[in-house]
Image: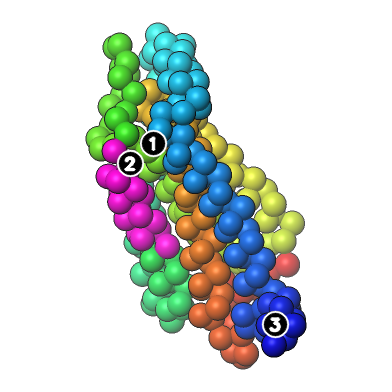
Amino acid sequence: MWRNYMRARFDPDARLGLRLTLLVAALLVVAVPFGILLREVTVSGPLTRVDTAAAGELHDYVRDSPLVVNVLKVITFFGSSLWFYCLIVPLVVLLLRRGETKAALFLGGTTWLGAAINSVVKVLVDRPRPSLVDPVATAHGQSFPSGHSMAAVVGYGALLIVFLPSVRKRLRWAVIAAAGSLALLIGFTRLALGVHYITDVLGGYALGGAWLLASASAFRIWRRPTQKKEIGLVHGGPT
C-alpha cells in the first residue's frame, strides 16, 4: 500500500502525482525560511539587531538626495495595493469576458487573498516600523512582513503564471527577469525609504513565495488535465 502511494506521488501522469509532489516540496523550501525569519522577529534575535542598524544607515545615505527619494517612491508604487487593484481588476474582467473563468479566479483570488494573509500576519506579529530621525516616507500598519514585497512576488508571479504562455518563447526569460528585478527593486525601496527592516522584506518575499506556490498548486489540481480546449493565456501561446 505504501509502495503504491509513493508510486502515485511520483507519477507524472497522475493528477496528484509528481507535479503536486514537486510543488509541495518547493512550498516547504520557501516556508522554512519564513519560519526562521518569523522566529527572529518575535524573539528579537540576532538578525533583527543587524537589520535595525542597516535600515538606519541606508536611510541616512538616501535622505539627502531628493531625486533619489523621488525615484524610490515611483518604484515602490509598483508594489502598492492601489497599483495592483488598478492592474489586476481590469485583467480579471478581461479573462471573465473571454470565458477564462478559472484563470480569472486564480489571478484575482491569489492576489487579494495574499493581501489578506499579509494583513493577518502583520497584526499577529505586531512589529513596529523603523523609528528614524527625519524620515523621508511614512507607512501605516505594522512592519512584518513587508506588504509591498509580498505583493510583488504574489502579484507579478500570478501574472506570469497566467500570461507568460502567451508570450513568445524567445522573450519569456526576459519577461521573467524583468518581473524578478522589479520585485527586488520594490523590496529595496522599502528599505531605502526607511519604512521596513531587512527581515520584513525577506519575510515578505518568503511568505509571498509560499502563498504563490500553494495557490498555483491548487489551481493546477483544479484544472481538468483532460480538457480538450485549453485556455490560451494559461496553457499555451505563440512560440
The amino acid at mark 1 is Thr
Q: Quadrant location of residue 137?
A: top left
169 with respect to 150 (left or right): right
Tag 1 and tag 2, C-beta contact below 8 Å: yes
Please say whether residue 87 is one of the residues in the magenta stretch: no
Q: Quadrant location of residue 138?
A: top left
Q: Which residue is mark 1?
A: 42
Give the extent of the magenta segment: 110-126
Q: Which mark is on residue 125?
A: 2
Q: CA distance from mark 1 to mark 2?
A: 7 Å
237 with respect to 211 (left or right): right
Q: Looking at the image, which residue is at 40% across and 41% down? A: 145
In the current view of this chain or complex, which residue is farthest to the left? 140
Look at the numbered disc 2 and give the secondary structure of its residue.
helix
Q: Nearer the viewer, residue 2 or 198?
A: 2
Q: Which residue is mark 3?
A: 2
The numbered mark, 1 or 2, whose residue comes first in the sequence reads: 1
Q: Decide: is 34 above or below 212.
A: above
Residue 195 picture location, percent across and down: 35, 27
229 with respect to 59 (left or right): right
Q: Nearer the viewer, residue 104 or 60?
A: 60
Q: Is residue 72 visible?
A: no
